[in-house]
Image (cartoon, grey):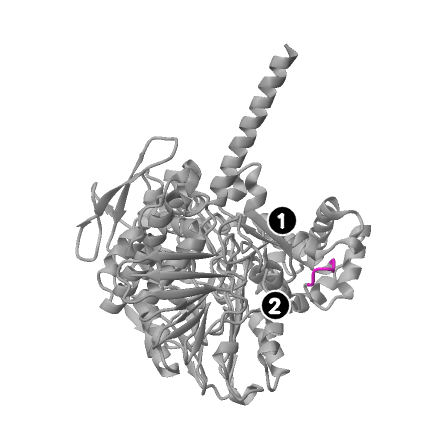
Amino acid sequence: MWRIVRSVLIVLLLLFVLVAAGVAGLLWSTLPPTSQKAHIPGLTAPVTISLDADGIPRIQAATDPDAAAALGFVHARDRMFQMELMRRAASGRLPEIAGPPTLPMDRMMRVLGLRRRAEADLALLPPDTHALLEAYSRGVNAWIDQRGRRAAPEFLLLGAPEPWAPVDSLLWGETMGLWLSANWRTELSRLSLAGKAPQWMIDTLWPPDTAAGNPEASLPAPRLADAAQHLLALLPRFPDAFTQPGTASNAWAVDGAHSASGAPLLAGDPHLAFGYPGIWYLARIDTPDTTLAGATAPGVPFMVLGHNRNIAWTFTTTGADTEDAFIETPVGANEYATPDGPRPFEVRHELIKIKGQGDQLLTVRETRHGPVISDLDGGPGPVLAVSMASLKPGNMAAAGLRALNLAHNIAEAGQAAPGITAPIQNMTVADRSGIALFVTGRVPIRRAGDGSTPVAGADGAHDWIGWASGAQLPNYIAPASGRLVNANERVAPADFPVFLGHDWFGDWRARRIRELLTALPHATPADFVRMQLDVVSPLARDLLPTLLAVHVEDARAVVALGLLRNWDGSMVRDLPQPLIFTAWLERFADQILRDAKIPLSNAGPRSEFAAYVLSAPGQHSGGMRWCDGDCSVPLRASLEAAVTDLAIRYGPDPTTWRWGTAHQAVFAHPFLSRLPVIKRWGVFRIESPGGDTTIDRGVPARGSYESIHGPAFRAVYDLADLDHSLFVVAPGQSGNPLSSHADDFLQRWRDGETVTLGPATPTPTGSIRLLP
């Protein structure tokens, strides 16, 4: 009997080893080879691609379409599953592979109709842009055809990806246009509080501009407020999977008079959600007529952030209000009121396939303003529709980006700016002789109102009656100061002729950038890199006098307050003060909102709100009104609560706490990070400095303090020699967890190391030859 048992055990062990070896072999087979050849239909000549030690491709092609095909091939080679998730998320097809958890995202995308909009825009693109999208698709499909379900590890379970189509590439821009212009959520939040909170509270939840009061915000009907609150609960929001934050990025530039070389310098670092793989992919492309180097986005055949042979460019989010919610008036069963009489809803039916469940049929209606977002609920109730600039016909962002890639100077970049229709961005540009900032795209002109809250749609009083773009929007060319800065603060004065919006983000990062530039009469690229790593918080410096005036008696709170007395506002990893400050401010803002019975999910940005409450003077006006003129009581209570919680997490002695322990930058795979056993291979972490209001930004997740939003790409462009420009991404070039390039940039990114993307490949480690 023992011999039989032993034999069975040996057989089972051998079977286990064989299965494990087979699985390992399959996974290993998904790694791309270091050297390979492939055929791509439509190439006019062979394309050579060299790979450096970091997995960065340098593409040499005969024509721009050939280069686009090559970029599609290397994007698919390293990021095919990321591209698959992007197009599924934008198309409303995630439940086919992920099941019910992704249904809220898909219902929203089906209602908004991102893919339908992209298909309509594709037909309007100019031939040269369309040709690049076609060539890029052929490159992606060459990889899919060659590898099948081994195109990425995830496809071993899902099966080979579907062929890539040109419209799929437009979905990336549609997605960015949606998430970086999220004012409609703010409008719904205001509506949800109407009649439930004093108007002055509603007006000051999104400081500073709304502090003066907004008479249009008074919509007290409880039915409308309840419907808005219910709708907000259905909408995905950052940091949910596949979402992005609404505020992002730093940019600054100096002209030749303020640089050591005598040529302009430009720095840029977009702040988006951290993830694995990262949103950006470094590449260099050379053709006889064109050089492009910088950050590409997998799925897109253009250089999104980077330089060509003559100019460099970067983007920051403008924060302009390009979305409005309208309260429509139903007439009968299938019509709604308009200034010209009843009009039927446009109706379509969307079939959502759900893994593990039956299909779901979603009925979607549209009005003359746009999609009926209240159809997300599917039940009776008020009809709320949304107008979004990014979803209006004629979104030519792909053609605008193509024109920017080809621009020879600042003037031509300015001509390209209106064509980059969505999202609305501040585009900072430098050529060899100067610097400029252009607001891209188009901003709606309203017949009346300011777009701060949902308004009635039946009478047409608040309809959009046109667009402002190009020279009508803020443009700053060759400023007398020789410097340009934008870090998401207001880009134009309040009396600017075109109304841009009601709600703006704090200017703390911009103030710090200007402070550092003032101390650099002749900057170098290395100076700009050091600036990008600066972690001094102007918000902390602003608020410390108020915080330090608080009297506390709790022993641990006394120690914490004493630590803050010796702090200069630097959010460095090895100090306890950044942790104390961040936890205290979060607790304070939450307590103020709870005391006012304001749902935490309905408020605006926490840093802006807390700063407003603590900085504005006066008992019956300004921010102190939230505390009845004296914030010392809630400040003391929130500090004591914060240090009690921190002691549970990090030990009883505040002097031993470290910001870096709590504030780890987290780059998580949207699927692998959620699976048991293997999730350790789907998440990369590293202790990081900075905070929400520092140049080196690391926005903490609520409660956990993990850094989930910041500059996963940094660049410094040297117009004296663009080949000496400096770059870094995080966590790495590859989306395959088995690849050495999955996270090999992570520590260098954190510590400020950079690479160049010159024409020569340093330490070549691989090569690809693409043939017609």
> Is 574 in the magenta?
yes
Q: Residue at 57% of width from left, 48% of height from top?
A: 683
In the foreground, 203 or 666: 666
Task: Look at label 1 and name its amino acid.
Answer: Ser
Q: Where is residue 212 drawn, in percent x and y?
A: 49, 66
Q: Which residue is mark 2?
A: 753
Q: Where is residue 121 drawn, in percent x and y?
A: 26, 60
Quadrant position of the C terminus in the picture: bottom left
The answer, for residue 642, to whether it is visible in the render is: yes
Residue 551 marker: none
Q: Quadrant of residue 518?
A: bottom right
Prevailing secondary structure of the magenta residues: loop
Report crowding for label 2: few under 14, some 14 to 19, many 20 or more residues within 10 A (C-alpha): some
Q: Which residue is mark 1?
A: 704
Sequence-wise first label, 2 or 1: 1
Name above or below for residue 414 compared with residue 38.
Answer: below
Task: Look at label 2 and name its amino acid.
Answer: Glu
Name above or below for residue 543 compared with residue 582.
Answer: below
Q: Quadrant of residue 389?
A: bottom left
Report crowding for label 1: few under 14, some 14 to 19, many 20 or more residues within 10 A (C-alpha): few
